[in-house]
């Protein structure tokens, strides 16, 4: 059905379509609308689920873990400080192999209080064992949320999935949205290690080094296998619903000499910059990174690369610039831009490309 | 006395210390709960005493979870089970640190939300897992590794905090009175909604007494009146007869303190504070039972 929605409403609608049994969540700007909407679905009876209004995000994730282990599909949503507050439980969810799906509305971290878009919240959870996808439109927020359930719950994966959307730039803007009737695209929830009290087992028991590393390796094996599951799921989604997704969204990259790599809305903005640059004779392209974990294999050979990071790892550099440097042969020009919702236009991005200098890092708007 | 069921859900191969009453109590808890039970265990001695993967000393499902998260995990679990029409008991078995300190937020949240579960705090009055540091439940005057000169603050009254949540069932118990504990767990599990049992669990290495005196220490805690056994069902308080007697004719506090190394050298002020807190609790409970509170 064609309609219009904000990013938050689109995520809530997708979560509803996936029919979770338990949703445990806590409000935080700019995510709140998602959980309010789900609470409303449950109250009006259009979603038959338990909505658990927990007292914190730590508890939101703990409740999702418990519910998932007990055999229920689970969903939650958060942002920024909420995501950080659940950090311990993010590791737990992945290690316990509970395929929780969560929307994270990307927002900067205090101090000072700032509610605008930034990716440092999600990247701080880089090593938790969660799959992470970043979207750039309302439609994609909806589609990625639907796919997240199928990917997370696939027996080859059984790891939680985080769907990231930029605060306000996506969460609060309205675009057209084509909703789907999900049918059997998402199979019924079935967790092979769900609690069965007729077969008592210890979960998360004291684990010595001889076995602990095997569990970690098993997580990594699943993370690696998730690449194939993601590809299959995206192909099946395209077959059923007609919209095509991949590890990146490439725009005019085929013959590009210089490629802009960015995530989320900056990646979309880069497409307009590419058109500008092309009209000036610069053979530019945009490669919007969708998946952050597992990090995709990117083919950037023979191109100059400009990476825009809406994040920063202090004392190190832009997370994406460094990820590209360590996974490809590229020596990118690294631009740190958009922190705390700093406005970055396509003109600015075109400027980054014009000023590119391999190996250099610049902070947009900082002159020293 | 009724014989307790012979089924064992805690095998003899736990790695608990000799004389550990929290693991002893767990036997009775599980005898009362039966096999259709999930024990949710945050970081504490109980996360260690189950044994080392892939072995386990436990013959019920145990779900280990992060230190602060037991009650919230139980909320999710209970919701999922009830949604599937499964009556499975969800029982948190948490230490005093995981209850009165780091876990108090998730505990309060789960109670307020009416989660259908039983939360048992086994109280060894310190952080046993990490080697006996003070907790909010350590009594005044007790030596722990972080209160080497004796704790200067009084024990946090978690029971009054819990009572303020208006639970349908809450009780105190003590490892030295297993029949009473068994009956209270049975009663608790027969009532829907959130339930709480606060279980005093003498701990030989932490309290510094010989392992064979655990039951005696527990009994003295009750007979001196320092630990009062009671239950509150839908707001109706009943004090156990043994505690009624102790309130009237208490054994001397010194009998309890003397056999525990943690109270060696306790100051007179700390001892008076201990006594004052006890007497105040007795007054409150008796007034409540008499219906005049
Ligand atoms: C977030 C976090 N902080 C600290 C610890 C370390 N830790 C594990 S158990 C424990 C103390 C547990 O004390 P209590 O709840 O009283 O249980 P007991 O060990 O006495 O059985 C501590 C401090 C932890 N596991 N997680
Ligand atoms: S330290 Fe105390 S509570 Fe912990 S296992 Fe030993 S006796 Fe039991
Ligand atoms: Mg303790």
Image (cartoon, coloured by chain):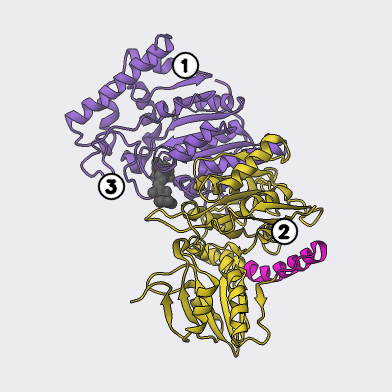
Where is residue A301 drawn, in percent x and y? Answer: 60, 88
Label 2 crowd bin: few (<14), some (14–19), many (20+), radius 10 Å: many
Residue A93 visible, this angle: yes
The secondary element bearing badge 1 is classed as strand
Outermost residue, front direction?
Answer: A279
Magenta-drawn stretch contains A230 = yes
Label 1 crowd bin: few (<14), some (14–19), many (20+), radius 10 Å: some
The answer to which image quadrant residue A291 occupies is bottom right
Image point (34%, 42%), residue name: B206
Depth check: A153 or A307 in front?
A307
Image point (62%, 59%), residue name: A161
Q: Is residue A146 left or right of residue B190?
A: right
Q: Mark 1 sits on what residue?
A: B237
* Chain depicted in yellow: A
Magenta residues? A221-245
Any atom of ligand 1 within 8 Å of the CB at mark 3?
no
* Chain depicted in purple: B
Are the numbered discs 1 and 3 placed on the same chain, yes or no?
Answer: yes
Label count reads 3
Q: Is residue B19 left or right of residue A323?
A: left
Q: Tell me if residue B75 comes above or below residue B186 in the rendering.
A: below
Q: Is residue B215 left or right of residue A163?
A: left
Task: Check the residue under mark 2 and report the chain it is in.
Answer: A
* Res. A150 mark: 2
The secondary element bearing badge 2 is classed as helix
The secondary element bearing badge 3 is classed as loop
Residue A293 visible, this angle: no
């Amino acid at each position: 059905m064609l309609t219009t929605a904000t990013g938050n409403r689109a995520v809530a609608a997708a979560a509803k379509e996936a029919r979770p049994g338990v949703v445990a969540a806590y409000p935080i700007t700019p995510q709140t609308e998602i959980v309010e909407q789900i609470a409303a679905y449950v109250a009006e009876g259009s979603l038959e689920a338990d909505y658990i209004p927990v007292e914190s995000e730590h508890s939101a994730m703990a409740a999702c873990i418990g519910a998932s282990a007990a055999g229920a599909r689970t969903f939650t949503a958060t942002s920024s400080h909420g995501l950080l507050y659940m950090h311990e439980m993010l590791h737990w969810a992945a290690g316990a192999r509970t395929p929780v799906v969560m929307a994270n509305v990307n927002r900067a971290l205090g101090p000072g209080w700032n509610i605008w878009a930034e990716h440092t919240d999600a990247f701080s959870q880089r090593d938790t064992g969660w799959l992470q996808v970043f979207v750039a439109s309302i439609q994609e927020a909806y589609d990625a949320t639907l796919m997240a359930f199928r990917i997370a719950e696939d027996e080859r994966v059984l790891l939680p999935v985080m769907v990231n959307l930029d605060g306000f730039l996506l969460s609060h803007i309205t675009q057209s949205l084509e909703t789907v009737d999900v049918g059997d695209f998402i199979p019924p929830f079935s967790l092979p290690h769900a609690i069965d009290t007729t077969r008592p087992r210890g979960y998360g028991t004291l684990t010595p080094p001889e076995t602990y590393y095997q569990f970690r390796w098993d997580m990594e094996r699943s993370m690696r296998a998730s690449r194939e599951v993601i590809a299959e799921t995206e192909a099946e989604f395209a077959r059923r619903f007609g919209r095509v997704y991949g590890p990146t969204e490439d725009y005019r990259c085929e013959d590009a000499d210089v490629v802009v790599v960015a995530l989320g809305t900056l990646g979309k903005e880069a497409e307009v910059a590419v058109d500008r640059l092309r009209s000036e004779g610069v053979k530019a392209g945009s490669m919007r990174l969708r998946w952050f974990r597992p990090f995709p294999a990117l083919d950037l050979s023979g191109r100059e690369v400009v990476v825009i990071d809406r994040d920063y790892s202090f004392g190190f550099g832009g997370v994406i610039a460094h990820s590209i440097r360590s996974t490809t042969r590229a020596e990118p020009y690294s631009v740190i831009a958009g922190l705390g919702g700093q406005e970055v236009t396509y003109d600015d991005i075109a400027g980054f490309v014009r000023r590119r200098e391999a190996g250099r890092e610049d902070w947009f708007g900082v002159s020293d | 006395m009724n014989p307790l069921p012979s089924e064992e859900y805690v095998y003899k191969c736990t790695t608990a210390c000799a004389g550990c009453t929290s693991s002893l109590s767990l036997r009775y808890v599980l005898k009362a709960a039966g096999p259709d039970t999930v024990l949710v265990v945050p970081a504490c001695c109980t996360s260690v005493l189950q044994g080392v993967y892939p072995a386990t000393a436990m013959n019920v499902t145990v779900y280990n979870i992060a230190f602060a998260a037991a009650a919230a995990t139980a909320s999710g679990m209970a919701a999922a089970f009830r949604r599937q029409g499964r009556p499975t008991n969800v029982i948190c078995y948490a230490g005093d640190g995981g209850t009165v300190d780091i876990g108090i937020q998730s505990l309060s949240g789960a109670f307020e939300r009416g989660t259908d579960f039983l939360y048992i705090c086994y109280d060894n009055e310190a952080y046993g897992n990490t080697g006996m540091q003070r907790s909010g439940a350590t009594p005044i005057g007790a030596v722990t590794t972080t209160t080497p000169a004796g704790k200067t603050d009084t024990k946090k009254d978690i029971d009054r905090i819990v009572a303020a949540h208006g639970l349908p069932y809450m009780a105190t118990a003590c490892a030295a009175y297993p029949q009473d504990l068994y009956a209270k767990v049975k009663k608790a599990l027969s009532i829907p909604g959130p339930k709480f049992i606060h279980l005093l669990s003498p701990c030989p290495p932490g309290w510094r007494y010989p392992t064979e005196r655990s039951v005696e220490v527990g009994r003295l805690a009750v007979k001196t009146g320092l630990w009062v056994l009671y239950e509150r069902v839908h707001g109706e308080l009943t004090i156990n007869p043994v505690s009624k007697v102790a309130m009237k004719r208490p054994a001397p506090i010194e009998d309890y303190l003397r056999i525990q190394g943690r109270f060696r050298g306790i100051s007179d002020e700390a001892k008076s504070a201990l006594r004052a807190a006890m007497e105040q609790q007795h007054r409150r409970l008796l007034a409540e039972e008499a219906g005049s509170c």
